[in-house]
Image: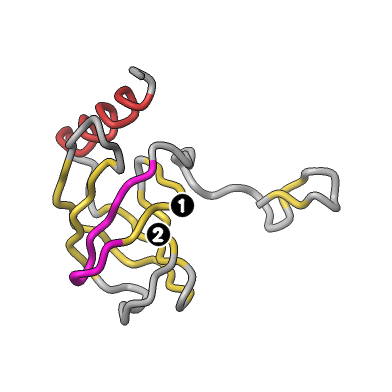
């Protein structure tokens, strides 16, 4: 996290994530029959906004993910672990495994974003 009052330094110490977070493209995530959108994503997981469900840290979930794009219809079904829940705000998910199919899915979605 960056602090604007401390000269753009990491205020919580060294960044522990191994994958860079990206805000675009935005993904639509279906979990427990509800549809949410991503704040950001990486090859390691997703941050979902406006989460109002009952999941707890450590829960294993199955999600359907789709590129929120009117020109492409890329979809996947993914197993993930709930890392953190801030009720009414965000849900952090970590992918169980990075398969070649999942990697290709993100690559196609990212590439499609720039083909306009």
In the image, residue 31 lies in the stretch drawn in magenta: yes
Q: Secondary structure at mark 1?
A: strand
Q: In terms of depth relative to the viewer, which is nearer, 85 or 68?
A: 68
Q: Secondary structure at mark 2?
A: strand
Question: Which span of residues is magenta-colored?
Answer: 26-35
Q: Which mark is residue 48?
A: 2
Point out residue 52 in the picture as x, y percentages from the top left corner: 38, 76
Residue at image x 25%, y 27%?
108
- Look at the numbered discs 1 and 2 and tell me whether their residues touch, using CB distance below 8 Å: yes
Point out residue 91 in the picture as x, y percentages from the top left corner: 40, 66
Residue at image x 24%, y 54%?
96
Q: In terms of depth relative to the viewer, which is nearer, 111 or 35?
A: 35
Point out residue 11 in the picture as x, y percentages from the top left corner: 73, 55
Gap in Å between the C-alphas at discs 1 and 2? Answer: 6 Å
Residue holding disc 1? 39
Q: Is residue 10 left or right of residue 25?
A: right
Q: In terms of depth relative to the viewer, which is nearer, 55 or 72?
A: 72
| Residue 56: quarter of image | bottom left
Judged from this view, the residue extending furthest toward the front is 70
**Circle nearer the N terminus (1, 2):** 1
Residue at image x 45%, y 66%?
90
Residue at image x 29%, y 37%?
69
**Crowd around label 2: few <14 · some 14–19 · many ≥20 (10 Å):** many
Point out residue 88 in the picture as x, y percentages from the top left corner: 46, 76
Q: Is residue 96 left or right of residue 22?
A: left
Q: Vertically, is 74 above or below 77? A: above
């Amino acid at each position: 996290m960056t602090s604007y009052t401390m000269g753009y330094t990491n205020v919580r110490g060294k960044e522990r994530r191994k994958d860079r977070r990206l805000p675009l493209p935005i993904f639509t995530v279906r979990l427990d029959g509800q549809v949410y959108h991503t704040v950001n994503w990486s090859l390691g997981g997703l941050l979902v906004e406006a989460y109002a469900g009952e999941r707890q840290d450590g829960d294993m979930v199955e999600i359907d993910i789709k590129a929120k794009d009117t020109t492409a219809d890329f979809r996947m079904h993914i197993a993930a672990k709930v890392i953190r829940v801030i009720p009414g705000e965000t849900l952090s998910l970590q992918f169980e495994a990075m398969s070649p199919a999942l990697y290709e899915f993100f690559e196609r979605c990212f590439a499609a974003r720039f083909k306009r």
